[in-house]
Amino acid sequence: MNEDVYRITEIDKVTNLITKEKPLALATLNVYDAYNEKDAGDIGSFEFKLASERAIAENADSFSVIDQDFTVDYDEGQGTIFDSEGETYADVSEIIVNPLDQSEFLSVKFKSEIRQAIMDREEEITFTHETGETIEYDIQRVNQNYYIKRETPTTLIDMYKLPSAEHPLGLDNNGMDNLTRLMYGGRISLMVGFVVVILEVAIGVVVGGISGFFGGAVDTALMRFVDLFNSIPFWPIVIIFGSVMDTLKMDPIARIFMLMAVLGVLGWTGVARVVRGQILSLREQDFMVATEATGIRTSRRIFRHLVPNVMPLLIVQATMGLGGIIITEATLGFLGLGVKFPLASWGSIINVASDPYVMTNFWFMWIPAGFLILLTVLGFNFVGDGLRDAFDPKMKR
């Protein structure tokens, strides 16, 4: 607001000094709160506050500033400013309402209710926030300050409860039933194992099938590619990847899928070598010569005639490798790099044993998960041994 102020100072009886002044600062007890965040800059400007204070001091109903017209309703230290359309623009008050935690946002409506309650000398107030939550606040006066308090609900969690009829394996450190967590954790551990095996077999069959069928330069190039993957240190890469996911605070569900993808991509080389070796011995047999003579396309010869002959060996290797994948996932979970809360896997459940106090005093929190991992891995290994014997022609003699 560019309004010139002139001051007349009498020097002597015949001389007056006329000086031109310009406002430099504004001292006021009033506090301005914008209703909309986009208007906060205009309301905080010197021109707006100066025009508003002049209107309040002169008991004026309106004022103009920043090429806008405003109306003001002010009474006994508290008022409201409206824009030209009659919408609430800002609140004016002599009472400052600030949160103790500056990261917490207080709405203008909430501040207005608190100020009105203080002026009415009320000791408590009930306010409904924009989220629909209704909270009771206590207003306590200490000297010239007022403190707004509310009750913080506290939920008691029955942690580390010993096994009972209601909870056969007790409760964990979050008050959750251990038996239920073991069942849900088993689903995730087995899902990780099966999905990773499928990825390994799929990639290994494609690479190994192409390498073994074509041979020559193609075989050499693909096997050097396999050697490159084998030279990658598995555990350091997986641990680094888990740390990166922790840093990114990845969603627990997305974390599982990323973990399965990484384990599958890093573990297919063994399958590729097995498929290549078998196809190298099969491609010169009579039935493959016949397929070539009939003009069957290459992809059909590989995946329709060669791969099915390798499938029994793949089933054996996949079954025996399933236990190793479950152990790998459990190891990552124990290190805190696998499945994250609130989801669970057997490995993440065993993670509580990293605390010596829990390991020595609450056996029911980690021994059942370890026992299930042992039984599952042994079971898949026994099934793999049985399938290997069943598919081995020498065992049928």
Image: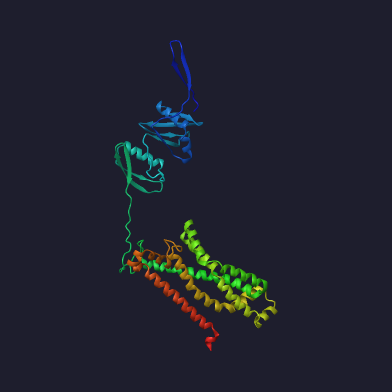
Camera-side residue: 226 or 8? 226
Q: Position of residue 386 (x, y in %)?
A: 49, 81
- Which residue occupies the foreground of this view, 256 or 42? 256
Task: State the residue at coordinates (57%, 68%).
Answer: 229
Question: Left or right: 237 with respect to 341?
Answer: right
Residue toward you, 78 or 206: 206
In this rendering, the count of numbered labels is: 0
Would you identify the image quadrant in which residue 213 lies?
bottom right
The answer to whether residue 188 of the structure is visible from this angle is no
Q: Residue at x 37, y 31 (%)?
A: 75
Colouring used for the render: rainbow
Image coords of residue 287 (percent x, y): 65, 82
Image-quadrant location for residue 90: top left
Q: Nearer the viewer, residue 358 or 74?
A: 358
Asked if one can make out residue 233 in the rendered structure from this viewpoint, the answer is yes
Residue 33 image offset from top left, x and y in percent? 42, 37
Residue 212 lies, in percent from the top left, at 63, 75
Farthest top residue?
Answer: 14
> Residue lying farthest bottom?
397
